Amino acid sequence: MKTPNTQRPRPGSDILWTALRRNVGAMAGGTALMGLYQAGETAFPIALGLIVEHTMQDRSLTALGLSVGALAVIITTVSLSWRFGMRILQKANTTEAHRWRVQVAACGLQPVARDVDLKSGEVLTIATEDADQTADIIEVVPLLVSSLVAVVVAAVALGLADLRLGLLVIVGTVAILSILAVMSKRIGASTREQQARVARAGAKVADLIIGLRPLHGFGGNHAAFASYRKVSTDAKQQAITVARVNGTYAGTALALSAVLAAAVSLTAGWLAFGGHITIGELVMAVGLAQFIMEPLKLFSEMPKYVMIARASAERMSLVLSAPPASTPGPKRPTAGGGLDVDCVRYGALRKLKFEVSPGEFVAIAVYQPRAAADLAAILSVNAAPPAYEGVVRVSGQPIAELSIEAVREHMLVNPYDGEIFAGTLRTNIDPSGTSSMIPEAVEASMLTDVVSLHRDGLDYAVRDRGANLSGGQRQRLSLARALAADSDVLVLHDPTTAVDAVTEQLIARNVARLRRGRTTVVITSSPALLDAADRVLVLDDGVITADDTHRNLLASDEAYCLAVAR
């Protein structure tokens, strides 16, 4: 799988230019076809006027047949050019939006400087809505150019009939765009504020979902819901403001276009009454006056979409330009190595020091949950090396000298609350579809009863966040995914807290057998896992206080016995 480009780009305007530059070919083809479509639309009233003009002079069936044939050609051109032009532009739009989503997600997975206040919900909103709205610039520019083509063709055609009609269209178009350009600036400012408030609401939702169970536990759910209601109301009020501004903008654009169309029609009628233009030219002018409202409306709306795309691009730049917490090194860890934590001080950890030899199965009994979380954060590189004192080495090489992607490929840290995704059991165990250890992982994690329970087996549909699975089933599914990855170093954080004692005993033995010869670290208080490990490290008050086998510690350490015995 190709690693996505995570180079952190420039401000919002540069993001838009990058999107335009990458899609020059598609935009050129789309612009040509959409320009042909608008030209064909404009040609229809022109052709109608010419048909009326020539029919009044030459009342023959041949002239009528040629006229009908010409209209059929115009209609066919309009239909096909629209269909294929929009197909090209929408494909480029969708592809570009996907590129930005991948890039935002890739940057979101990297640790960034602490002064960047971006939560997971905000990153999610930026990677979805803002990426889509930024990519809309791919369609906006060709539609803008094609609308301009329609207005120019209409102005030239009317100018050939009478110069005053052509000048009226040009002057009217410039006046309309000048008025709307001023109004579009307010749309951009309002949209930026709305997107920021929606992102904050999304971040609050993500936090609530993650912490819903603990909130219910100590009765804080009502206060949390009230907090969400406040940010949600702020987002709603701003959305109403944006809708009001957009409505005013659209109404003004439509009214001005209608005024211009009426002015062209009345002027053409006055000129025809005075004998300055013919009846055929009058028909053409009235037809163009009616038609020109559509490209004018489209043309006048483009500044609004440009401002929305720019606001979204600026939101994306918050993620893409966020400074990294550290500059990762270029090296990769060697295969089959161990793990060395040397005098690390971070959060609840105080000069933590231990070593896991290659192929060893080590359990870490942590007395304080905060220390376990801090250790997992360091090993998963969610806490970057500059954020803590000391050194973490993988295969003898400091993490600071390794690329984050290489560390995560070599050392998998499976959290106790691993996410379950909508899909199937199989896609959750092997998201990339490349693992050859699915059967072994299913058996080792004791997920076999879940697979056999359903007729579809591994293809059983799983709802978002595993809503149709029990807590123990979700935990075993997450464990199966970690085992199926078959990484050189595997770190498991409380992998069996939601399963019964018998199942826990079987899982401990299975994991030890499956991971034999591979470096494995389990952060746990489970007696079964502690007993299955080659040795146990006791982490108390941020330091290692004991290093022995589980049974020896039970016999000699009363505090350990009280902490882990069930």
Image: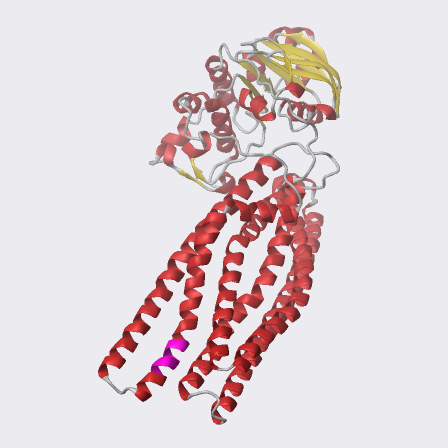
Q: Residue at x 28, y 73 (%)?
A: 69
In the depicted structure, whether residue 453 falls above or below residue 29: above
Name the one closer to the observer, 243 or 144: 144
- Residue 392 percent location from the top left of the image: 67, 17
Is 432 contained in the magenta span?
Answer: no
Tell me which corner region of the image, top left, top right, bottom left or bottom right, holds residue 563: top right
In the depicted structure, whether residue 120 falls above or below residue 146: above
Q: Residue at x 60, y 8 (%)?
A: 551
- Residue 224 percent location from the top left of the image: 69, 47
The answer to whether one can see residue 384 in this image is yes
- Residue 349 percent location from the top left of the image: 74, 21
Q: Residue at x 52, y 53 (%)?
A: 138
Tell which residue pokes out farthest to the left in this image: 61
Name the one closer to the observer, 542 or 287: 287
Q: Residue at x 75, y 26 (%)?
A: 347
Q: Which stretch did the figure color magenta? A: 45-52
Is 46 contained in the magenta span?
Answer: yes
- Residue 228 percent location from the top left of the image: 68, 51
Residue 416 left/right relative to 388: left
